[in-house]
Amino acid sequence: MSDTDEKGGWTEKAALAGAAIGSAALAAALLYASRRREKNTKPTAPPPHPEDAPETD
């Protein structure tokens, strides 16, 4: 038997690490998407009217 055939070999550890990285990436993508959605659904203030603008030179 070689090192790769043993239980808990480097391939199994690499697979677990890959799954953890993938899960973290998926969670980050979902958080990013939800923040963008919240940002786009918030009402924005209407543009100021020219008659209400402060006086400038």
Image (tube, helix red, strand yellow):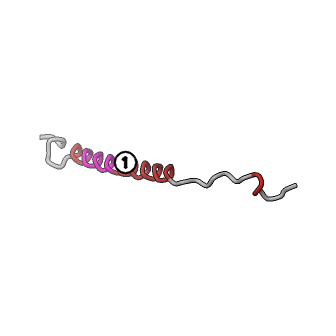
What secondary structure characterizes most of the magenta part? helix
Specify the quadrant that holds the C terminus.
bottom right
Residue 41 in the image: x percent, y percent?
A: 49, 51
Horizontal side, residue 51 vs residue 47: left or right: right
Q: Quadrant of residue 14?
A: top left
Asked if the magenta segment contains residue 57, the reply would be no
Q: In front here: 46 or 36?
A: 46
Asked if the magenta segment contains residue 21, the reply would be yes
Residue projecting furthest to the front: 51
Horizontal side, residue 31 vs residue 45: left or right: left
- Which residue shows up at 44% across the image and 50% down it? 32
What residue is shown with label 1?
25
- Which type of secondary structure does the marked residue at label 1 adopt? helix
Residue 21 in the image: x percent, y percent?
A: 33, 48
Please report the bounds of the magenta region as a residue range: 14-23
- Label 1 packing within 10 angstroms: few (<14), some (14-19), many (20+): few
